[in-house]
Structures are given as structure tokens and as C-alpha cells.
Image (tube, rainbow, N blue to C red):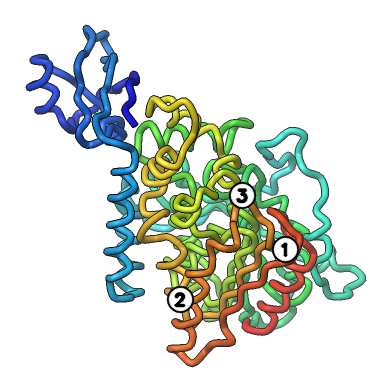
Amino acid sequence: MACSSSYLLEPLSHVRALSHLRQTCGKSVSTHPPIFSLLPHNSTIIAISNSTSKYRFIHQVICSRAESTHFTESSEKKKKMEETPFNPDKRRADFLHLLRSRRSSEVPLTVELAKPVTNPMYQQSPPPTFSEAMESCPKADIENLEDLLVEENLYLYTEASDQGRLPVLILSMKQSGCVSKRPAIVFLHSTHKCKEWLRPLLEAYASRGYIAVAIDSRYHGERADSLTTYREALVSSWKKGDTMPFIFDTVWDLIKLADYLSNQRDDIDYARIGITGESLGGMHAWFAAFADTRYAVVAPIIGVQGFRWAIDNDKWQGRVDSIKAVFEEARVDLGKSVIDKEVVEKVWDRIAPGLASEFDAPYTIPTIAPRPMLILNGADDPRCPLAGLDTPKLRAQKAYEAYHHSDNFKLLAEPGIGHRMTPYMVKEASEWFDKFL
């Protein structure tokens, strides 16, 4: 399907397709290479306006290639990946290389004491006030529990950037006498929430002897300064291509958090660190366990999905609607009248490279074997379509069987439930950690 559209080009030093433009237009052109990557490969640029001090505009782009060609290439890439031998270490190394490629500079992990947050930042209005699911979490029957809880507020510095300060909240029970090593569990919040939202879970797990840890993910909580911080970060990632605010940058923080929990805590058994989260937090838990084997037990809740499957089967709308602003921005930049599967794929490739290809669920979930993994989803969740997990589930089962630990993997889909964490899911996750940690 042919199309015509307008594109805004921002200046950067590195120029992609510059020689083609000069040959076509006979002018000196300063361009933004990531925006050029949005154009179909054999587009013909027929006119460029006079430049202003900051921008140039392409007035018209004629796309001579059909949309279907793009997806033929995607199918060929998928087929090639299917034929590649399963190599968890190589997959993990490739992902870590991607994470490091977006760091401005790595810094030594440093720890700083922080104060409790008195007015948590929620990027939704009105802010949430109660979660039946979290309040249902099994808790030890301790009469004066609040008096026996120890609260720690910390900042970890994970990289040299504006988002390099990682806020951490830790709850545990007071110990008398010698300090004993205990298991720890990391809890991750959903979109627009923050670590303080997770307090009911932290208190419940701490009452049962765990060291309960929560963080603010990128552009959330203490790392946000307005109701639109996360949305703006996603759009900026699409425009500039220099950050990965959707999932991946927070995974970097979780690797650094594992460094801290494993190496700088006398009260944590580094071989018994679990991780869980809800929705976006479930995705963070999934990818952190993929990237870092120190997360010994994992239980993502309403977070695991097949991104490629959703594109191929036209089931991407639920996930897209959860962060729609970036897709609307991409739609405009791509000259589309509506968000379609091409827009969706280009956004994923841009803000989370490999999310719908080599780092998708069929290729990363199996790498977690043989560590215990419980996936908890709603059977009717439009953001995490159950059919999209058929292949990841089968591959994971084979991987766990190869290690002779079939019982270490389970996928539970609660009937009649959409994109919602339920008391049942909280109970199952709790029992999973009690069993394996």
C-alpha cells in the first residue's frame, strides 16, 4: 500500500542515508538517523525544504514498497531464529551487551541512606488507595508486627545518568543476637505506581521471615517529577533511540540491585533471592531472571506475553493501549492514519530492541530453567493473550525436562480474569516462594 507523509528530522552528528539524500536532492543535509530508520528501505525522497536553524523537513515520501514486504522480512528473521540452536548463555550475553550499549558510562555501585517517602508519586489521578489482592497476602499472626518491622530506605547509584539513582525500600523483622542470613524477595510495581504501593506485600512477606525489597522502576515514584514523566520518557525513546524506558533500563537496575543484595548484605542468603512483580513489574521480573541467574526463584504476575505472537495474530491492542501515547506519536511520524501492526513492531524495535524477536518469551523464558518459575496470568487478559504463551510454555517445559526439574515450571491462568492481579495469584506466588526459597 503506497503512502505519502511528512517527517521532522532532528540534527545529530551521525548521518544515516546521507549520501542518498545528497545524490537525490543535491543539498547538504543534517539529519536524525533514528528517524531515517523509520522510512521503508526503498523510499524515494522527492523534496526537501529550506532549512531552519534547527530542522529540515521532508515534505513528501513515496513508499514504493508494500507493507506486506516488511512482514515477510519479519517472518524470515523469525524463521532464522527458530533454526538457531538453543544457547541460553549466548542469548543472555547478547541481552547484556544491549543493556551496556545504552549506558552513558558505568559507575561503581554506591549506596546512600535515604528518608522515607511521605507523599508517594502516582502517575494516575486519582491515586490508588487499596488493593484487595495485596491485602490478602498471607501474613504471620504477630500482634505487634509494626513495632517489630525494620524499614530501610536507600539509594543505589547504578549508572551516570539522570535515572541512575535507584530508590530502594526494604522491610524485615528485627533480629536479636547474631544476624542470620535470610531469603530475600524483590517486588516490582505496575505502570504508574511506585514502591510504596507494594507495602502490604512487603509487610506480609517480612512477617514470614523474608527480607522484602521494592524499588521504583525507571521514570516512576521518586524517579518521576510529574504525572506524565513515564509517558514522556517513552515518547523520547521513540524520537531519540538513546534510552529503553520500557522494561530494559529497569532490568539494568535490577542487575545492580542483585549486586547489592548478594555482596553487601550480611543478612541475606545470596543463593535465595526471589523476584516477582505485577504487570510491568511482572515483565521486569521475567527479564531480570533471564538476565541475572542470581534471581533464584521467579513469579511474574500478569506480565509474561508473546510480543511477536501478538503482532502476527493482531492481538497487540491491549498492550498498546496501556502506553498509547508513544504509539500515537509513532503513527504520526510514520504517516499512518491509524496504529497498525507495522507501527507496533517499529515501536518495540525502537524502545526495546529485540522485544518482539530474539528476546521475546519463546527465547527467554526457557533460559530461566532450571530455576523455579511460576507464571501467573488471567485467562482473559487482553494485554497478555494466553494463546501467545503456547510456544513459550512448550519450550520451557522441554528445557526444564532436560534438567530433570519439570516441577520447577508452572503456568497458571485464572479463568474469567482479565488484566488484574487477584488474591488467588498472590496466594499461589506466596506458596511458590515458600516452597522454593
Q: Secondary structure at mark 1?
A: helix
Towards the viewer: 103 or 423: 423
- Counting other residues with Cα less than 10 Å from the Cα at mark 2, is it few (<14), some (14-19), or many (20 or more)? some
Residue at left 35%, top 67%? 92
- Counting other residues with Cα less than 10 Å from the Cα at mark 3, is it few (<14), some (14-19), or many (20 or more)? some
Q: At which x and y percent is residue 187?
A: 63, 61
Q: Relative to 94, does residue 15 appear above or below in the rendering?
A: above
Please say if the residues under marks 2 and 1 sit with CB atoms less than 8 Å apart. no
Q: Secondary structure at mark 2?
A: helix
Q: For the residue marked with disc 3, what is the amino acid?
A: Ala
Q: Is residue 356 visible?
A: yes
* Nearest-to-viewer mark from 1 and 3: 1
Q: Secondary structure at mark 3?
A: loop
Towards the viewer: 27 or 342: 342
Residue corresponding to mark 3 = 114
* Nearest-to-viewer mark from 2 and 1: 2
| Number of the label disc, if any, that sits on residue 395 | 2
Q: Looking at the image, which residue sits at the far right? A: 143
Residue at left 59%, top 50%? 216
Nearest to N terminus: mark 1 or mark 3 = 3
Residue at left 45%, top 76%? 395
Image quadrant of residue 239? top left
Q: Is residue 23 left or right of residue 356?
A: left
